[in-house]
Image: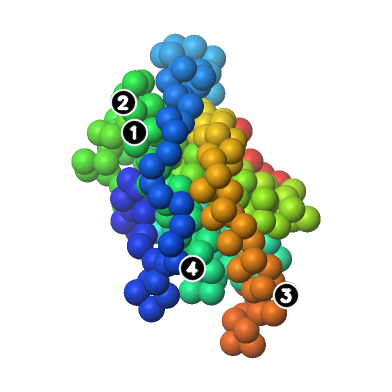
């Protein structure tokens, strides 16, 4: 079992100090409490569908999809970035992408307070708070009492996919497929309802559209683009390509969404 916290924040490695980039300040971001739909109410078709998906996915314990979900649950922006390597077509090493890692870290720090307000608005219990069924991470205890809707991992995963799509436009389809899988891993893990994740995708799309219009964020993207194109075109000899087995697991996950 893996222990996973609520956030994804990870400071850039001291060996690779982050260059200066966009600050954490900026204009107010769109309020998800206005544009997101509320989570399904009890005893509705949506609530029943969420419960059915949660129960059905528990049987995947120990499977390849389960192991992929465990990898996706690793804590830190660096792990989230690396998770998109198969989709990018080359290894996204945080150690070789300090500007991009710094941009994602700042993006997360900007968005996390917004997600916290959204979660507090609906205060939805997590699916495992009342049911002792297998989880792919050790996330019971205090975390079980934190709100479930919308999913912060799905929100940030979708935004990361949007960033990478901006930087590697010829790989947009593969990257956004991976962003979908990344969110669905929270359902496979059993730590979010399916509707938490779909709301996270909407949340990420809206928040990224807003941030993308900000001049300092656009400047950070430009710096990250130069960096990632250099890594793509001239990868270091010691940097291995993405693991074929993990890429195959992602392909299979894409074809078998939890529903």
Q: Look at mark 3 in the image and give the residue it sits on.
A: 233
SS assignment at label 3: helix
Q: Are marks 4 and 1 in contact (CB under 8 Å)?
A: no
Q: Are marks 2 and 4 in contact (CB under 8 Å)?
A: no
Task: Tell me which residue sits at (50%, 21%) in the image.
Answer: 36
Looking at the image, is mark 3 or mark 4 earlier in the sequence?
4
Judged left or right of residue 34, residue 184 is: right
Q: Look at mark 1 in the image and give the residue it sits on.
A: 116
In the foreground, 222 or 245 = 222
Q: Nearer the viewer, mark 3 or mark 1?
A: 3
Q: Are marks 3 and 1 in contact (CB under 8 Å)?
A: no
Looking at the image, is mark 4 or mark 1 earlier in the sequence?
4
- Residue 57, x across and y down, in percent: 51, 41
SS assignment at label 4: helix
Q: Residues within 10 Å of mark 2 (few under 14, many from 20)?
A: some
- Residue 68, x across and y down, in percent: 53, 57
Q: Residues within 10 Å of mark 1 (few under 14, many from 20)?
A: some
Judged left or right of residue 188, residue 161 is: right
Could you give the CA–CA distance between mark 1 and mark 2, rounded to whole angstroms? 6 Å
Q: Look at mark 2 in the image and give the residue it sits on.
A: 120
Could you give the CA–CA distance between mark 3 and mark 4, rounded to whole angstroms? 17 Å
Instruction: Return the residue found at the far bottom.
Output: 237
Q: Where the C terminus falls, by quadrant?
A: top right
Note whether 74 is above or below 25 in the view shown. Answer: below
Q: Where the N terminus falls, by quadrant?
A: bottom left
Task: Tell me which residue sits at (34%, 21%) in the image.
Answer: 121
Q: Are marks 1 and 2 in contact (CB under 8 Å)?
A: yes
Q: Look at mark 4 in the image and give the residue it sits on.
A: 98
- Residue 197, x across and y down, in percent: 51, 35
Judged left or right of residue 151, residue 241 is: right
């Amino acid at each position: 079992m893996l222990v996973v916290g609520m956030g994804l924040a990870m400071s850039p490695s001291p060996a690779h100090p982050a260059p200066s980039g966009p600050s954490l300040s900026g204009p107010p971001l769109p309020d998800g409490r206005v544009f997101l739909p509320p989570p399904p109410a009890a005893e509705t078709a949506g609530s029943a569908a969420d419960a059915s998906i949660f129960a059905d996915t528990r049987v995947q314990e120990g499977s390849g999809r389960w192991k992929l979900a465990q990898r996706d649950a690793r804590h830190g922006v660096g792990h989230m970035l690396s998770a998109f390597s198969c989709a990018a077509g080359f290894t996204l090493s945080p150690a070789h992408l300090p500007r991009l890692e710094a941009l994602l870290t700042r993006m997360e720090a900007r968005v996390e307070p917004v997600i916290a307000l959204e979660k507090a608005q609906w205060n939805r219990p997590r699916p495992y708070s009342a049911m002792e069924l297998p989880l792919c991470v050790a996330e019971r205890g205090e975390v079980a009492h934190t709100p479930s809707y919308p999913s912060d991992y799905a929100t940030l995963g979708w935004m990361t996919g949007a960033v990478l799509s901006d930087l590697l436009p010829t790989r947009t389809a593969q990257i956004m497929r991976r962003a979908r899988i990344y969110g669905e891993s929270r359902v496979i893990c059993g730590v979010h309802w399916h509707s938490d994740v779909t709301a996270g995708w909407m949340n990420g799309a809206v928040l990224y559209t807003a941030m993308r219009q900000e001049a300092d964020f656009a400047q950070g993207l430009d710096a990250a683009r130069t960096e990632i194109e250099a890594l793509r075109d001239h990868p270091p000899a010691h940097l291995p390509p993405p693991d074929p087995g993990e890429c195959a697991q992602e392909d299979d996950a894409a074809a078998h969404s939890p529903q």
